[in-house]
Image: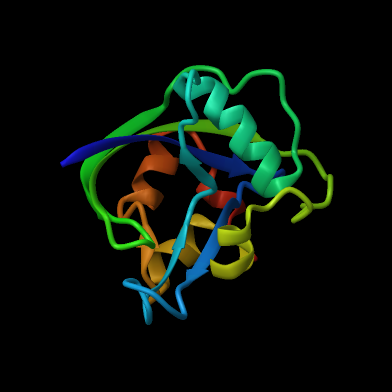
Amino acid sequence: MRERPSARLLVINAQQHVLLFRFLHREGPLAGTDCWATPGGGLEAGENFEQAAVRELWEETGIRVESVGDTVAQRAFELRLPDGEQVWAVERFFMVRAGEQALSKEHWTPLEVQVLAEHRWWSIEQLRQTTETVWPQDLPDLLLRLGVNASNAQA
């Protein structure tokens, strides 16, 4: 099984909410799957995790940063890609504090245009209460470990 390294972003706004995208697959091997996940994606040739995180943040949100700092979490698991390929996903997470700038879809890839249905800023409490599928599953605990303030968790 091919290893697929990817960079994921925990984008936190001033209200201590995390940005998630809703992935809604309408066709192909993942047709019918619907989940919320952090921005991010696979490394391109010659990129390290940090470079991929900076690029993915800009492509998926329009937010530009020079650096994303150190890895704050990581995980590895088996993943089915939209084309049906099974890969061993190796993900590293980076935390970014977002300003008040509006999000942009301008640099989305054709696949992102097809599967990214919406975005939402989630509080830790909303993450704990939702019945929707959210990846990573331990996101509320991860945010608390990283010092995201749950007391500012009103929507």
Q: Residue at x 43, y 23 (%)?
A: 71
User: Quick check: 126 left or right of 155?
Assistant: left
Name, please, the residue furthest toward the right.
101
Q: Quadrant of the C terminus?
A: bottom right
**Relative vertical location of residue 44 with respect to residue 102 in this rendering, above or below:** above
Quadrant in the rendering for residue 65: top right
Q: Is residue 121 visible?
A: no
Q: Is residue 26 visible?
A: yes
**Relative vertical location of residue 4 with respect to residue 15 in this rendering, above or below:** above
Expressed as whole percent of the image width and height from the top left, the position of residue 50 reads 52, 21
Expressed as whole percent of the image width and height from the top left, the position of residue 49 reads 46, 24
Q: Residue at x 24, y 46 (%)?
A: 87
Q: Quadrant of the N terminus?
A: top left
Expressed as whole percent of the image width and height from the top left, the position of residue 19 reads 59, 53
Q: Residue at x 36, y 31 (%)?
A: 73
Towards the viewer: 67 or 33: 33
